[in-house]
Image: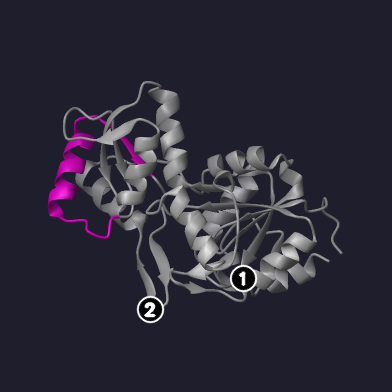
């Protein structure tokens, strides 16, 4: 047993916690059957913006996990909501990203354009080339708002780690001399959205992730309990590098759930 407030909800990162690209981490149907047995609410929060919310619902379902679209918050959604608050009528933006991000922004009234964009929105783009970097950095140099969906430098895959959004943002920052405003973790914005959707107080939510500088940092900033699982990027040695610390460290999600008895 622990001395913290009782856990009523889990806010779960996905890449590195539930799966590595197309490979599930553990028996996900059994894991979520146990979560349901304990009557914990769940939300899914990810820095990845390459998929739309509906695509995440489908991917979870393919692994035997059912959820509602409103319980999935990604950095693309956080970016779209930020733009909507700033530009309620929508408008044109320059998007350096994949179709999932384009679709999410379009749902909020923001379309890709080379004509006087309100903002440059940069994310993971596995077809990035010099032309895109040139166009985006030129707009940023002209003073256009520079938004990054997340700062993750790499992504876990079954074949190892590949360059992430942070690598593209670094190139744009070097070319433009400007730093992006980050929408995803370590900003706590997505956790605030998740807490509102779940209807729980921060102290009753456990934020679970595999990266100290993003997942755990955002959870701590949001006031949640936090858990680092060692199935992704960060290691036990990594933890010592940070002033803030996770509430729990576990080898994987099943071990963590067992410890919460």
Q: Is residue 247 visible?
A: yes
Q: Is residue 9 above or below residue 79?
A: below
Q: CA distance from mark 2 to mark 1?
A: 21 Å
Q: What is the quadrant of residue 111 in the picture? A: top left
Q: Give the magenta range.
A: 125-148
* In the image, farthest residue toward the bottom: 159
Residue 142: % across, % down: 19, 30
Membership of 139 in magenta stretch? yes
Q: Is residue 117 above or below residue 239?
A: above
Residue located 39% across and 36% down the image: 107
Along the polypeptide, which appears first: circle 2 or circle 1? 1
Q: Nearer the viewer, residue 91 or 220?
A: 91
Q: How many marks?
A: 2
Q: Is residue 34 left or right of residue 252?
A: right
Q: Is residue 247 left or right of residue 156?
A: right
Residue located 48% across and 55% down the image: 56
Residue located 14% across and 54% down the image: 130
Task: Give the residue number, with chain letter if any, for mark 1.
Answer: 28
Label 2 Cα neighbours within 10 Å, binned few <14 / some 14-19 / many ≥20: few
Q: What is the quadrant of residue 63 in the picture? A: bottom right
């Amino acid at each position: 047993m622990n001395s913290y407030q009782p856990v009523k909800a889990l806010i779960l990162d996905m890449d590195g916690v539930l799966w590595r690209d197309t490979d599930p981490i553990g028996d996900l149907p059994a894991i979520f059957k146990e979560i349901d047995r304990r009557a914990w609410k769940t939300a899914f929060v990810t820095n990845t913006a390459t998929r739309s919310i509906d695509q995440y619902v489908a991917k979870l379902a393919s692994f035997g996990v059912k959820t509602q679209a409103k319980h999935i918050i990604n950095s693309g959604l956080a970016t779209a909501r930020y733009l909507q608050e700033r530009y309620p009528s929508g408008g044109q933006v320059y998007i350096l990203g994949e179709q999932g991000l384009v679709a999410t922004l379009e749902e909020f009234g923001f379309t890709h354009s080379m004509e006087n964009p309100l903002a440059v929105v940069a994310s993971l783009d596995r077809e990035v080339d010099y032309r895109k970097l040139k166009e985006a950095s030129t707009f940023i140099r002209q003073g256009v708002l520079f938004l990054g969906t997340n700062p993750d430098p790499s992504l876990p895959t079954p074949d190892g780690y590949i360059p992430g959004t942070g690598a593209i943002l670094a190139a744009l920052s070097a070319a433009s001399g400007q730093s992006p405003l980050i929408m995803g973790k370590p900003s706590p914005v997505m956790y605030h959205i998740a807490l509102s959707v779940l209807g729980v107080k921060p102290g009753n939510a456990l934020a679970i992730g595999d990266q100290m500088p993003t997942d755990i940092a955002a959870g701590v900033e949001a006031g949640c309990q936090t858990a680092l699982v060692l199935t992704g990027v960060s290691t036990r040695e990594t933890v010592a590098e940070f002033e803030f610390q996770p509430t729990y460290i576990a080898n994987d999600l099943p071990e963590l759930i067992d410890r919460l008895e």
